Amino acid sequence: MTADNATMPPEAPPREGRARPPGGHRLKARVERAGRTVTVSLEGRYTFDDAPALWSRLRRIVWLGRRGRAVRFDLSGLESLDGGTAALLAHADSELRQRRVETSFEGASERVERLLGLYREDRVTHPRQKARPPSAIEELGRATAAFFAGAKDVFGFFGEMVLSTLGLLKEPRTGNWADVPRLAERAGADAVPVVALINFLVGFVMAYQSAAPLRQYGANLFVADLVALSVTKELGPLMTAILLCGRSGAAFAAELGTMRVSEELDALRTMGFGPVRFLVLPRAAALMLAAPALTLVADAAGIAGGLFVGVTSLDLSAGAYLRETRAAISSWSVFSGLLKSVAFALAVTLIACQQGFAASGGAEGVGRRTTSSVVASLFALIVIDAAFTVAFQALRLS
Amino acid sequence: MVRVRGLAIGWGEVTLLRDVSFDVRRGDVFAVLGGSGCGKSTLLRNVIGLEEPQAGEVDVGGRGRPNLAVGRPAFGVMFQAGALFGSMTVVENVALPLRQWSDLPEPAVMAVARATLGLVGLKGAEAKYPSEISGGMKKRAAIARALVLEPELIFLDEPSAGLDPVSADALDELILALNAGLGLTVVLVTHELPSIFKIVKRCIMLDKEAKGVIAEGDPRELRDESDDPRVRRFFHRKADEGGAS
């Protein structure tokens, strides 16, 4: 029998400050090779502190394992081991057997044997099948199938919402109207400060950025036109919708997702409530009421931001600025923004609720769907905005 | 009351259960038994119409397979964790189905809801929110919600799971009292042996490996007389009796 320690990595020296093994025993693991048999002798007491050194030694033995070879674990000198080191031994045993290496544990005390028995898999192990990475075509196929499955879910949800709306119109008494004021307050009134502040800053920044080039042409006053038109037709409704998406849309997705995973949606169904009618339509109604009101606040705040810059930096009087604003905007420019805001609110509600209803798998699933709802809603808002712009141009309404 | 024939449950090419058949008679306390992951709750979801089976027939109360989208439900359901709505108080949870399906004025709705909460031993908890009550109380409140429309049949998913022995026993007593006092037919999914022997009159046992029903009858008789090692293992709480299934 020849010692083969030279091929093995040296035992890791104890790190400074690291606790010594209980009892101060010196740990020892000898590896000897005789012919095709490798004997691993473990001596002393093994605790979790010894796991890293044991792990690197066992990895080496497993790496050297070949079909037809044998590894004999001599545990006669092993006084004790804990669960962690027993798990490492059992893991090495399993790996060796998968490589068709014969293994045996010999000389273990009853206590050690019992502990090892808890971790060792006694069933016959089979060679591991290497996971074949999916080909590009396979991945494309899977992604396409997932896309169509997702699209089917969205259209199915939309169809259910249309049917529920028609049902509600036929039987208004069955609507969950009681929730609408509470939801509208949460989505609308509670959002007024943040909507006002953000849009004030938008008007402020826009006026500031446009002031310098307009001043070169002596057209300071036109800052009012620029701010008023941009805010009422585009930025007011869009910024409001983005805030609604982040506040209310995310809240809807998380709330409904949590209800989904805690079986509350199923409970509703078994009580004869359509979850769409009971939960989605009140949210849609609340958001569609709140969005135009918030958009008006946003318009006013944006114009106020521009007015602040006009008065403080452009030597304009408040009266002149407001007169110019009044001349620049028409009732259509305000109304078109409100119209957009209603469509934005509907899109945000639909996407958030659909994502919430599709949640599964606990907190992680709810979080994933909430994130998806925000991303999809933002994308949808931009697409809808573009569609409105093109439609208004085509109808000569802009 | 419930008739199931040749039910097959699965997803795509995966089969969870196949050829499941059983009958629940009026006034029964009937249990679906089996180890974890054998498909008990999924079977329940298929029977009550929450999921679509791959094949087979279900008839609940002589109305065929339940269509949850149409009309007032013919049965009540208690889900494993209660599934109470967190934004409503306990009494509002119980009142919800009454508001939807009865023409009672609001004071009468609240009176019936409070009385039903009293029936399940929750007097005094009416104004609390679900987050403020214990797991056992949540289950009682969920039973009250399932009972408030006076169904003849109630489905309970793991009613005593996760409860301490005293609360579990109290819930068993409640189920027995509802069965005897109201003539309620009870179908429950469980693997709690004390509950099974105390309240269940007839049962079927599902097995994960067999993907179906492996025993049917009185649970006490199955415990004492069955030769099937899988049945004996379950009733005698012995993981290694009779070898692996």
Image (spheres, coloured by chain):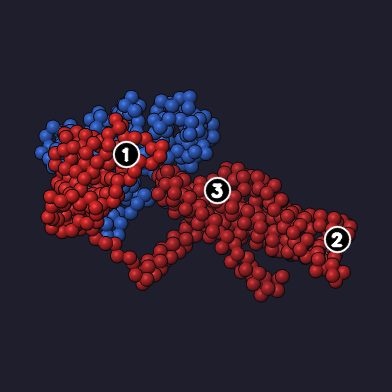
The image quadrant where one finds the C terminus of chain A is bottom right
Q: Which chain is blue?
A: B
Q: Is residue A268 visible?
A: no
Q: Which residue is mark 1?
A: A48
Q: Find residue B59 and name its label.
A: none
Q: Are marks 3 and 1 in contact (CB under 8 Å)?
A: no
Q: CA distance from mark 1 to mark 2?
A: 73 Å
Label 3 neighbour load within 10 Å: few <14, some 14-19, many 20+: some
**Mark 3 falls within which chain?**
A
User: Quick one: A97 or A371, which is closer to the camera?
Assistant: A97
Q: From the viewer's perspective, is residue B153 above or below residue B47?
A: above
What kind of element bears circle 3?
A: helix
Q: From the viewer's perspective, is residue B80 above or below residue A128?
A: above
Q: Which residue is mark 2?
A: A314
Give residue A105's quadrant in the image: top left
Q: Find residue A251 and name its label.
A: 3
Q: Is residue A349 visible?
A: yes
**Residue type beneath disc 3:** Ala
